[in-house]
Image: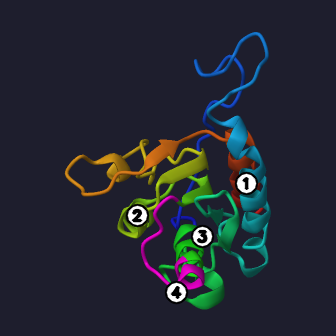
Amino acid sequence: MASAHHPAAEPAADGPSADPATDPATGSDPVRDPWRTSMRLALSEAARAVPAGDVPVGAVVLGPDGSLLSTGFNEREATGDPTAHAEVVAIRRAAARLGAWRLPGCTLVVTLEPCVMCAGALVQSRVARVVYGASDEKAGAAGSLWDLVRDRRLNHRPEVIPGVLADECARQLTDFFRNR
């Protein structure tokens, strides 16, 4: 399972001096700060994966108005479904709740950069925005290894906001793999 959904996470910069978007005077980051509360919910979801032996990745889908539509966490070990990544679980639940496969104006917040499969699901579901915590240098498809979600050859390209609570997200994954 070490090569599961996302084998390892590399912490992305998550501090005042790490990003030019951060205001040096206040330490605030107008790009990432609005997503911290949602990312904390995604981190809580990720913790729910651990009892079944799944890699702790959690996701939430927010509606265009910012309301919570759905949540998800990795369920591959629990369900025996290789596609049960947190992102796919959350997208399926949001689509079911809305009664439509298109999720325009919605935002997916996930603790780890999406893999190729999840990036494809994000493009297909037409989410407006992808917000992720830790970068995945080995399997990331939202800017690290590949950049599928912003590929100009595709008909839909969501906005990508990386590095929200990146250190906390990476720590959760590192602790999981260290304790295996």
Residue extent of the magenta highlight: 95-105
Q: Residues within 10 Å of mark 3 (few under 14, many from 20)?
A: many
Q: Amino acid at mark 3?
A: Ala
For marks 3 and 4, give the one nearer the viewer.
3
Task: Please count the marks in the image.
Answer: 4
Left or right: 3 with respect to 28? left
At x 70%, y 41%, the residue is: 34
* Residue that sits furthest to the left in the current view: 153
The numbered dot on residue 90 is none
The numbered mark, 2 or 1, whose residue comes first in the sequence reads: 1
Above or below for 135 versus 48: above
Residue 130 sits above or below residue 124 on the image: above
Q: Amino acid at mark 1?
A: Ser
Residue under numbered circle 2: 126
Q: Is residue 109 magenta?
A: no
Residue 86: numbered disc? 3
Among the two numbered marks 3 and 2 on one chain, the one whose residue lies closer to the N terminus? 3
Label 4 belongs to which residue? 81
Q: Quadrant of the N terminus?
A: bottom right
Residue named by callout 1: 38
Which of the two labelled residues, at mark 2 and mark 4, occupies the earlier sequence position?
Answer: 4
Mark 3 or mark 1: name the one nearer the start of the chain: 1
